[in-house]
Amino acid sequence: MAEIALKSLAHSYLANPGSPEDYAIREMTHVWQQGGAYALLGPSGCGKSTLLNIISGLLEPSSGEVLFDGQVVNALPPEERNIAQVFQFPVIYDTMTVYDNLAFPLRNVGTPADKVHERVLEVADVLDLTPQLKRKAKNLSADEKQKVSMGRGLVRDDVSAILFDEPLTVIDPQLKWKLRRKLKEIHQRFNITMVYVTHDQLEASTFADKIAVMYEGQVVQFGTPRELFERPAHTFVGYFIGSPGMNLFDVRVRDGEVIADDTVIPVGRGIHDAVARARSNNVRLGIRPEFVEVHGTPVEAGIEAVVEDVQDLGTYSILSLRLGDIALKARIDEDSPVPSKSAYIRFPDEWVGLYVDEFRVEIDHE
Amino acid sequence: MNNKVRNNKAWWLILPMLLLVAFSAIIPLMTVVNYSVQDVFDAQTRYFTGTEWFVQMLNDPTLQSALGRQFAFSLTILAIEVPLGIGIALLMPKKGWQASAILILVTLPLLIPWNVVGSIWQIFTRGDIGLMGWSLRELGYSYNITRSPLDAWITIVIMDVWHWTPLIALLCYSGLRAIPEAYYQAARIDRASRWAIFRYIQLPKLTNVLVIGILLRFMHSFMIYAEPFVLTGGGPGSSTTFLSQALAIMATAQFDVGPSAAFSLIYFLIILLVSWVFYTAIMNMQKDKKDGGA
């Protein structure tokens, strides 16, 4: 068990990387605390798996250090890092039985047979594999095979951490939920650091206490699911988390007012001043559809928007609104009245985020 | 279940295949069966002999010893070619121009026709001008494949290994390339030794190509004819007269069509039986044991 730290870590698959785009992992410093359940969330190709392979030692980083409990492990191969990793597609040893598969990592380091037996039975019990123990692993179904793969990681009680690389890709939806619960249970029971790579926000937020969102080789935000939702630190987090994603629109200051495409946006002094201070062409306000206030009749400081479409999703509706050239989404509960032609919307100051060059700028509300 | 509409017209679809197989295999085979149960004197005179030829052939000491030699030969070359082929495949580079270059070099012997292989080795082993024969003599070993049965035997085995190990190597190479990288990564994570990786990942993944390779090599070597015929002519004495050569002498030189037909059938059945037993045994290894699991 260990704390895993990444210090000024960067990786490129090219021999002579030049621009930042050449890097699969851009320089980062990050700490995974001992015993935490973490998710690494991001779209395909953002560097999640690369990062995971660097932690496990399958890849050597171009620069920077990987530390386990303060010890630099860069030079250690995966065999010596004492780490477990579960891959996207189940890897099982075809000719062995399920029992032998689970025993394999222990036998490789010469663990006494009675200890092996005890651990295998315990792990098989946790994963509901006991009835399958005598079967050949080759003849199992895909989800049973993946459980065997996970079991090989769990069977070692001395591992520093278990890394999961989208382990539920091949699993049916109902079983996915079950296995995720199982993982959570295992985490609580064994108190092992777990890092779970996924591109599914639901999977990440049900499994992890803290989520690292990756985008173009960088960790753009590291926080609890709630923080990611309420205060996205990067426009990508706003867009990637939540369904639909955050509303973002360009703003500027004119005559002491915040303007978005010729429409005056009534916001507090703090936001106005922050927008005025921003030295960039890329200044945007962001607000989640859940936090947009929608009224059917004119209200004070309400902006009139055209209702273009209403999508009824059962317990709530998603409104597609238009404000000049700006398209907005708003979410309203099923019992609230749905405005038909025009809606009057307000943006509560505390839910409005300011993004300069894609990163959030904290606002001092007086 | 019984209220299904039954329509057996689809059986007609196998008719073309049936005709093809009839002309390519069944009819020629039946003519052999026909000869094997008759004694043919000339076009008009023939007698039905029943199982007489079969009994006679099975008791023929010449054929018995040829059969023994044949088994010894096939087992010897399999015991050498299979491990050697796997070893070569494991050593072959995985990518780059080296991979292509090695691939071509390894494949070359496979492209040479059988009797040409025999001729090449015949010259190669000559004591006066052959590189191998001359070198061995210069080194003080009185190498002579026309006199020493042991020399002849070893030379034929080496020749076959040289000619056919590439087939096993190529099959294994393709099998190894098909193993996903994740298996090797998982093995490293599981702290598996090099031997364990070979034993539990590579060898199991090679099972299917090896079954094909071993069956092909068994059938091929069991029917070997042209190479020893050109190299040693079956000698010295009859020490390298293998089964198909013994059969050819009987059928064409002595024109004993009845006995040779009977023996051809026995020959065919032996190959079929060995192949079937081998294949079934390997496939059974992959099944769950009866008492275990669901």
Image: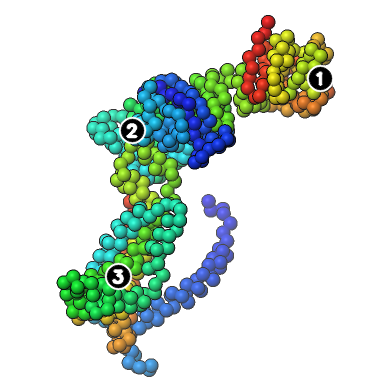
Measured in 3D between alpha carbons, the distance from the residue under mark 1 to the one under mark 3, in whole angstroms, is: 89 Å
Mark 1 residue element? strand
- Residue A15: numbered disc: none
> In the image, A194: left or right of A21?
left
The C terminus of chain A lies in which quarter of the figure?
A: top right
Q: Nearer the viewer, residue B109 or A168?
A: B109
Q: Mark 1 lies on which chain?
A: A
| Residue B33 placement (x, y as % from top left) | 36, 79
How many C-alpha atoms fall within 10 Å of the one at disc 1: few (<14), some, or many (≥20)? some
Q: Which mark is residue A80?
A: 2
Side of A35 relative to A231 (left or right)? left
Instruction: Work out whether B38 lies above or below A185.
Output: below
List the residue tagged with mark 1: A263
Amino acid marked by disc 3: Met
| Image coords of residue A306 (percent x, y) | 82, 24
Q: Which of B49 and A125 is in front in this view?
A: A125
Q: Where is residue A300 in the image (x, y as percent from the top left)?
A: 81, 10
Respond whether the residues carrying marks 2 and 1 are from the same subunit: yes
Q: How is the image coloured?
A: rainbow
Instruction: Tell me if residue A354 comes above or below residue A92 in the rendering.
Output: above
Q: Residue sitting at 43 percent across and 35 percent down? A: A60
Instruction: List the residue tagged with mark 3.
Output: B159
Question: Does residue B273 appear in the picture of this structure?
Answer: no
Q: Can residue B4 be seen in this view?
A: yes
In the figure, is residue A140 to the left or right of A348? left
Q: Nearer the viewer, residue B179 or B118?
A: B118
Residue drawn at point x = 31 percent, y = 29 percent = A119
- Badges 1 and 3, same chain: no
